[in-house]
Amino acid sequence: MSPLKQKEKGMTNIVKIVAKFVSPPIVLFGIYMVLHGHLTPGGGFPGGVIVASAFILLILAFGREMASQKLKLSTASTLESIGALIFLSLALIGIAAGGWFFFNFLPKGEPLRILSAGFIPLANIGIGLKVSGGIFAVFVTLIMFRITTGKGGR
Amino acid sequence: MWEIYALAILMIVGSIVAVQTRYLLSAVISLAVVGLALCVAFLYLQAPDCAITQIVVEVIALVILIRATGIEKDLSEIKGRREIFALVSVIIFIVVFAAFAFRALSLLPEFGSPVMKVAKEYIEKGLEQTGSANLVTSVLLDFRAYDTLGEATVLFTSILGAIVVLREIGRKHR
């Protein structure tokens, strides 16, 4: 069997089972990092990339067909657009609330609580959605290009 | 302090190996070594936000690059007189750059001594003005949120461009 055919069907059973157990905690860790971006190191960008990396791990282990059932390319690009719109609309709501562009219109709250720092957690969620969808969509696009052209696959 | 210099030397050696090696896969691996050393340098300089972003993006980029390269040899090799010309011009450039950089760097303040007044303002008033305990996030998403919007737009546009260029519809099938 050629290596290309093996890649389409995914890797061995060991890799598949380990990926199955490891990928949900990776997603959870990414979500934690997005939600606690205003308290601990991290934030929307690294958290989003971590969430995307869990799906990339699934693609690498199970092959493109299995993983694209979990998260389709169109869903990923929709998530990216929604995240960008959340971030932009937060900036515009600041103007509507009587301030300026990116005016922090929500109450500051008590420091070191998860519901603090005004709109910063919401902006982190928007950036996290945007980055995770974007990185995943780029990875899926690159893989599909490689397989459909037939060149470069050895 | 010497740890930073050791990491910098490791990064320089990794970059030279990445440029000079004949195998694309080893070039990618040595590029990953450069990124990993940069991550450790960020941790040593007490910048965990940068370190987390660096390691995560590095791993994803490494996966994409390994998928993108085969294990074939890099065939675009320069030999003969052109190689000597390239070597001489690179050495001349490095000497000129080092001479000017030495003069410029001697004017900089000492390593680790803060001189930026704006950054001092952020550190002192960041918590009370934004309520965010993580100062990096308060700078990224409140004081400098406009820059973050620009960065997000750049990422959005580049991903849009990649998807449009590599899309399946409209490509000629042979």
Image (cartoon, rainbow, N blue to C red):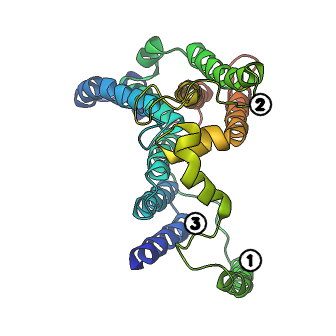
**Mark identifier at residue B19:** 3
Nearer to us: label 1 or label 2? 2
Tag 2: amino acid: Trp
Q: Are marks 1 and 2 on the same chain?
A: no
Where residue A52 sits in the image (x, y, percent)?
47, 29
Please say if the residues under marks 1 and 3 sit with CB atoms less than 8 Å apart: no
**Mark identifier at residue A100:** 2
- State the residue position of label 1: B82
Marks 1/3: CA–CA distance: 16 Å
**Residue at the spot x=42%, y=27% of the render?**
A31
Left/right placement of residue A26 relative to residue B143 reads: left
Frontmost residue, A31 versus A145 = A31
Frontmost residue, B169 versus B103 = B103
Vertical position of residue B134 compared to residue B11: above or below: above
Tag 1: amino acid: Arg
Vertical position of residue B109 compared to residue B120: above or below: below
Label 2: chain letter: A
**Residue at the spot x=70%, y=20% of the render?**
A89
Where residue B152 sits in the image (x, y, percent)?
67, 35
Other-residue count near label 2 (Cα within 10 Å), few / some / many at <14 / 14–19 / ≥20:
some
Q: In which quarter of the image is residue A123?
A: top right
